[in-house]
Image (cartoon, grey):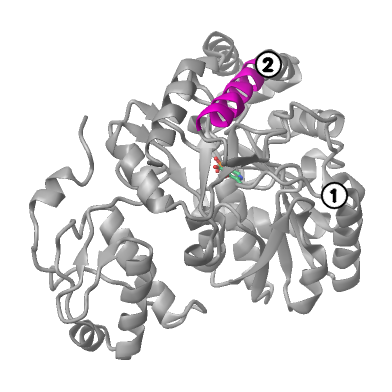
Amino acid sequence: MSRPNSDAASRTNSQFPADLLVVLDRTRPRSLRAQLESELRRLIQSSQVPAGTRLPPSRTLAEDLGVARSVVVEAYGQLASDGYLDAHQGSATTVRAVATSRSEGGRAGTAPASTVRFIGGLPDPGLFPRAEWQRHYRAALTAVSDRELGYPGPLGASALREALTGYLGRVRGVMTSPGQLLVTSGVTQALTLLCGVLRARGVRAVALEDPCFGVHREIVVRAGLRPVAIPVDQDGLDIARLTAHEIGAVLIAPAHSYPMGAVLSGARRSALLDWARGSGGLIIEDDYDAEFRYDRTPIGALQGLAPEHVVHAGCVSKTLTPALRLGWLALPSDLVDEVAAEKMYADMGSTLLEQLALARFVAGGGFARHLRRVRPTYRRKRDTAIRALAAALPDARPLGVAAGLHLYVQLPSECDEQRLVAQARDRGVLVEGASWHWAEPHLAPPALVLGYGSLAESAIRDGIAVVASCRS
Ligand SMILES: Cc1ncc(COP(=O)(O)O)c(C=O)c1O
């Protein structure tokens, strides 16, 4: 088994490279301390600053970066308490040989060669309907005219927008039309486009669930918008807290919040729509995990209740594979042109042949049949994960179990999340710590995001046993 930091760990006490790129952007709303902390974390996670490296004294780094010394002292202090650094009075601050949740989680950075990889929200690649997809792709390629083999246009292939209009209306209660649907490269691009439009419209702040998918918070920040963290409890986002802030939009996954798996309650759905109608703010609905629901009746999309106040975002990353990079937005009419312009300048439109293959898959009913076929398999995997956790980690509490491809596992408060993640990795199990999804990672209660979707049941059992063995 190779470990990302094993080579690095052997090079103990190397010097911090003086020319290493640390980017601090003074135009961003994020504080310099937070930026420095996340830059250093990134450099450690990617092993660009390997374990054992001596960091420069705070005064020296502060001078190099042109910031107050307290900025560096606080960033070092935070990283030390997060377990990234060893800092002792009177001696140099050095990088610890613990890797971190984000790179280990497999979302970013170098993936280690672990035997069991619990990746949050990944579907089983073995369930991708290869033969059917091949058939639809071949048919699409045969049928496409020479005239169509040009730029696909910013809204996307009309055949796919028609197929999705019907499917989303039937299955999710989404009220849209082909003219208001825009095909994207996944939800990731959908959010990037929307944030660009919001920013151009003068919006300054966007509310996000806390915790939320860490990448989404970063998308908001990169667009020059201020993320406002609103807590999530068992009833979903605490809508009452929205009114305390001046925000232009709220990003929410009402069907199954990520990573905690909360479902927005009926009362809060109404309150959220009231907020949008009253404030003119936009609701961005990430229809996350809506298709994989095991223990309760399906919940319709929010968008169907107020199509002019809600943007609905979806994708095939969980239902088919993230490798396709296909997603969509159902837009209020007044946003279509602006989002289409963003898409135009982002990539001149999404890849056409995949869109045409998906259109055939959806329109012919194969996509819905595929979901019916794979749902029981994911349910069995989910049950296996819950049983294995109950047996091996009885004091841990799985949340969000009713849907999706992962569990949010609350650990006992004395548990050290980072250490558990690092020890599990050393024993060949890749599991993601949950703290990086929180607005204040150092305040996050210890937890794991246990993605079971891509694993065989035996691997789920074995992997959880290994994680449990790291507790002692
Ligand atoms: C909360 C959430 N929404 C949506 C997505 C899907 O993103 P994409 O469609 O870009 O693959 C993810 C992926 O991990 C996610 O965590």
* Label 2 packing within 10 angstroms: few (<14), some (14-19), many (20+): few
Magenta residue check for 470: no
Is residue 442 shown above or below 356? below
Q: Which span of residues is magenta-colored?
A: 377-392
What label does residue 420 carry, if any? Answer: none
423, 351: nearer the viewer: 423
Q: Is residue 382 magenta?
A: yes
| 351 over 204 or under it: above or below | above
Q: Residue at x 70, y 57 (%)?
A: 232
The type of residue carrying mark 1 is Ser
Q: Which residue is mark 2?
A: 376
Label 1 beta carbon less than 8 Å to ligand 1: no
Q: For this rendering, which residue is in front, 347 or 214?
A: 214
Whether 317 is drawn above or below 25: the answer is above
On the image, the x and y values in percent for residue 182 come to 69, 44
Q: Which residue is mark 1?
A: 265
Whether residue 148 is visible here, answered yes or no, is: no
Q: Could you say whether the residue bearing mark 2 is in a helix, strand or loop?
A: helix
- Main secondary structure along the magenta-highlighted residues: helix
